[in-house]
Structures are given as C-alpha cells and as structure tokens.
Image: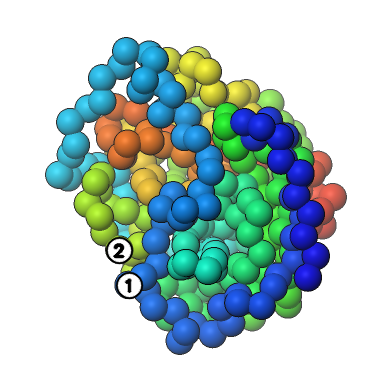
Amino acid sequence: MRFLSVVALLGLTIISTVTAVEGTITRLEDINWAEVRPVQESPLFKVKRAASFIDRYSGRREPEPERSSGRINNGVIVEPTAVPYIVGVLVSVEHGTYFCGGVLVSRTHVLTSATCVQGQTSITVLLGASDITRAQDFVVVSHVRVHPDFSSFFQANDLAILTLSRMPRFSDQIQMARLPRRAQVGESFANVWTTISGWGETASNTGEALPMQRLRSVRSQVISNFSCTISFPLYLRSSNVCTSSDGGAPCVGDEGGPVTIVEEDGQSTVIAIHSYTYSRGCTRSWPAVHTRVTDYLNWIEIYTGANIRS
C-alpha cells in the first residue's frame, strides 16, 4: 500500500496519490445497493459546499423544497449504448459504500470529481451500466491522482484521474469519451445546449436510495459565468462551466458525471465534469456548476495518454 496526502487548511492545496488497498469491492454481487449512499453522506466528506457559505451571508433565502422538479427526475432513461463512456464510481470505506459518476477517457483511465475520491484508496468502477445492477464490467482502481490545485473549501479544480487495474472489456456499451479539441480552449460554450447524465437523485429532498437503477440524461443550457456568479459570487472560477436548471439539471449523486455537447459531425464531446449544485437540495432557481475540461487538457493528456485533437 502507498499513500501520500498533503492537505492545507481550508483545502487551499491538495496533492493526493493513492493506490488500491484491501477492502475494495471486486465483485458486482458483493454490493448491497440498498446501502450505497451519495458521497455527501460519508462522514469522511469534508468539502464545504459553496452554497452553504452563500446561504449564510448573502441574504438569499432558501427556496421551498420541491416535491417534483424538472431535474434528472424528469430526465430520459437512456438506452444502453447512449452514453457508453459514463462509469459508476464506488468508494468503499469502513462504514459504508459511496457513489459518484465518472468518464472513461482512455483505455485505462477515468476522469471524475476530486470531491468524490480525495484521500480514498478502495475504489471500483462500473462500466456499461445503464442498468447499474447489471454492469457489463467491473474494474478495481489501482491509482488515484487528484489535481494538485484542488481546493476542497472552494471546490476549485475539482478533477481526479483514476487508473484502472486492467483494460475494460470494450463493447458498444463501453467506449472512451471524446474530449474537446485544443482549438476549443477559451470557448465559453454560452447558450449551447448540453446533455448531463447520471444515476443521482430524481428530485430534491426525497431521501431516495442511490444510485438510481437506470441511467438518466437531461438537457440543460450553458449560461454565462457572469450570470452564474450571481449565485456563487465567491466560488466561481473561469475554469467552471454553469448550466441553467430551468429545463433540468443534475442532483445529488451525479457528481463526476459528463456534461456533453453534440458537435457538427453529430458526435458527443465531454466539455465538463459535474462538480456541485445548491448545497441544501436541487432547486430550479440555482444553476449547476461543472469543471471545464478544456482548462485541463494538458494535465489530462500527461497522466492518461488520452487523444487530444488539435
């Protein structure tokens, strides 16, 4: 076992490199799905959600909880081959198993949210899992690399790379994602429609068991960072992409999942990884915040060998 972690107060700088240890789930049949919870419910979850501070000091009132919303609850249950690059990320700790999303970006690497895996060593990914209980492949993670500038307090640079212990069994349900071109660096994507996918909660404050059995996708439009700063004035960075929640958005359990656009050739490109939403529940009035992949292409290429188009 190897474990190295340097953590600064308030999460200003975190460098984390870990390798898998005993206790990692290695068989799909060993999972008790009724006991799997979103990573936010883990006692080890130390991220101070951005909106929590804003709730307290901005004077903005918390919206009334919604019994139903236009978020992933009204998203479309997707076909098995619709999002072949999404993976489920299972984090095993002494007191339970926790869940996030991720994206397969090379033959042996997954891109996910640093929030999900920071400091963790027992991680497994599920691939080809449009039905999470019938995943086509199940691979143990051998190494975790959290972005060196990840801030748990500000939730900045919220990316991590998971190295798989072996190549997955590629099929029409398990494929690598297409990443942005270098020519797209600096593009805001404002007003572009995206698709956000995940197994997260289908409505605010429902207490649903997670992950949901069936993968869902929802359409959501990118808004300008200027508009998004109104909701998250102290936390938003140029390295974030925000999407409106008017027509649908991610919720608890969708962290680490892909935010994609369809380009002129009809193919989907992952432009962002979902990071966070409003801390007290998913409501229509707050945008969703994601990590902008174009700002990290060099880092991704160095540590994954992923093909970055010019």
Residue at 37 percent of width and 55 percent of height: 200
Circle on res. 196: none
**Pointer 1: residues within 10 angstroms few (<14), some, or many (20+)?**
few
Residue 35 in the image, given as x and y percentages of width and height: 36, 70
The image quarter in which residue 279 lies: top left
At mark 1, the secondary structure is helix
**Residue nearest the viewer, comparing 178 with 266:** 178
Residue tagged 1:
34
Does 42 appear above or below 67? below
Residue at 47 percent of width and 29 percent of height: 50
**Residue nearest the viewer, comparing 244 with 81:** 244
Which quadrant does the C terminus fall into? top right
Residue 222 in the image, given as x and y percentages of width and height: 46, 30
Does residue 231 appear left or right of residue 139 in this picture?
left
Asked if marks 1 and 2 touch (Cβ < 8 Å), the reply is yes
**Residue nearest the viewer, comparing 223 with 40:** 40
Residue 18 is at least partly visible in this image: yes
**Residue nearest the viewer, comparing 52 with 284:** 52
Residue at 41 percent of width and 29 percent of height: 52
Residue 207 in the image, given as x and y percentages of width and height: 25, 55
Circle on res. 209: 2
* Callout 2 amino acid: Ala
Name, please, the residue furthest toward the left.
Answer: 67
Which quadrant does the N terminus fall into? bottom right
* Callout 1 amino acid: Ala
Residue 303 in the image, given as x and y percentages of width and height: 81, 53
The colour scheme is rainbow
Name, please, the residue furthest toward the right.
Answer: 302
Residue 81 is at least partly visible in this image: no
Does residue 205 appear left or right of residue 173 in this picture?
left
**Pointer 2: residues within 10 angstroms few (<14), some, or many (20+)?**
some
Does 173 appear above or below 223? below
